[in-house]
Amino acid sequence: MYKMLSLWRIFHVSIFLSLTLPVFSDVEFPKDQRTDHHEFPPKVSRKRDKLVPVGHLRPFGFQRRPEGPVVEYKEALHPERFWKDHVSKKLPCVYRGDVADSPAMTKWDDGYLMKNYGDLDVLVEVKKEDRTTRPKRMTIKTFLKGYLKEDWYIVSVLPDEMRGEVKASKSFLCGTFTKTIQETNFWMSSGETASVIHYDADHNLHCLLAGRKDFVMIDPIYYEELYMVEKGPLVGSGFSQVDVDMINMFKHGNVAKAKWTWATLWPGDCIYIPAGYIHQVRSYGRSISATTLFTSYDEFDAESCKGHEFPYTSMRDINVMWTYKKGDKVIEIGYMNTDILRENLLILLGEKRSLRIERFAQYFNHLKYDIDPEDDAKEEDVTDEVREIFYKFDLDEKDFLTKSEIEGLTLEQLKDFARMVDLPTYPPDKPNFEYEEDKSEEKDEKREEGEGGEEEVKEEEDEKVAEKEVKTEEGEEVKEERVIEEAEERPEDEPEEEPKGHGHEHHDHDEL
């Protein structure tokens, strides 16, 4: 009997270890690529249990029935109507088949992306979004080698080289929108991703090129019911502390009070997500999206829309404020709208003949450090940092700017201002992640090409070890390359804040 109990304990221990310890194997376990196996919106039980709330420990969406689908259109709206009926009112809408004639729809399989764009850099995050894990920068080639086995997804600026194969929505081709596009983003994953419940600072037209995505859309009036928190002062975006995969209704019971609408996107479809509108997204199957982030004004200038015929236009042919191309040191994502910076400077000027550096210093310190300005501008507000950026505008260093000088500021001058106020969302270094397969392939190639064989590979490895030892002796911090799950967290003292209404969170940012 004791022998049987011992065997029983051994069996349980073996099962426990198999479930809890990491498994190392050369056998690949491909991700589920199906797109039709999830029912959405979910069926919510009408039965009420006096002890257990509806939707307890279920995913977000099971706590109450939706109000209905998001408003849909069979084609993209004219820019003026898009602004009048949706952007100005901050009401979501869906365009069916808006980008279905994009070359990317038929070309962008893994082989094509590897061959044509494999050397371009992207930012990669882990699928279980928590808004705290920092992304890694890697090449598309590296991502494609690992994304079917790792819990990765790309959320990055759409490289200039790829923009020509994605259609720009008709809604952006004339009027005010031609001047307010912040950036275009590239999203890719193997599916089964889930975003947190969140909202972003910028308006967003999210277009699906492959896979399927389900959107839960919630009016911002339900901010408190969803236990939302702001990302930080002056950021303009925020997220919920609720676990979207398993909601504890005893702890977060107010979730059931938040009314919601829904939308499912299929390849070629787009959804407009207004700035500040709360949403949550799930993706299924190999998923690729291209998104357009933009700002808006109180009025729409339709002058350029007169007689406009709206020919096919790619994303490469529209004006975009923040872009990335091969060779750029920084993937500039999440920066503020430079036009709004100019507008703010003119507001500071007001009816006066010139904008003094002291007044500018108050604005700068409030924007970057959230320091409330006093009634009177003082000389001590003018730090070396303030002078450095002000003299990029005031080339004669006369300590003031006229209205004509502010109106004549170039895009690059305003971008320099934005870079100083709003530090990059991600590290400005070259790709810092190399997949293990890449390393082994490089060694194999050297052996095959006869470039020193194993001895040279060993010498290179010894040099790296020696270099590491020297750095350690000198007291410098040495960081090793690790996979995403083992990556060190971003230092707590590194700024993360973005000005309210100007930037967005990458992982707005957002949809997975």
Image: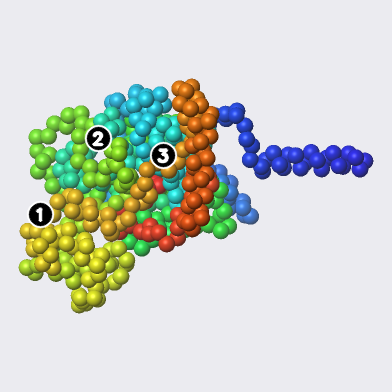
Q: Position of residue 341 (x, y in %)?
A: 20, 57
Give left or right: position of 506 versus 414: right
Q: Assign the C terminus to one quadrant of the image.
A: top left
Which quarter of the rendering shows the N terminus? top right
Mark 2 is surrounded, within 10 Å at the Cα level, by few (under 14), some (14 to 19) or many (20 or more) other residues, namely many
Q: Residue at x 51, y 36 (%)?
A: 459
Marks 2/1 in contact by CB < 8 Å: the verdict is no
Quick one: SS at disc 1?
loop
- Residue at the image point whose x is 46% and y is 38% from the top: 434
> Does 497 sit left or right of 127 as displayed?
left
Q: Amino acid at mark 2?
A: Met
Q: Which mark is residue 408?
A: 1
- Residue placed under numbered mark 3 in the picture: 138
Is residue 486 placed above or below 348 in the rendered structure?
A: above
Q: Nearer the viewer, residue 437 or 259?
A: 437
**Of callouts 2 and 3, the N-terminal one:** 3
Query: What residue is pinned by disc 2?
Result: 315
| Residue 132 % position (x, y) | 46, 53
Q: In the picture, residue 220 is in which quadrant? A: bottom left
Say how the picture is coloured: rainbow
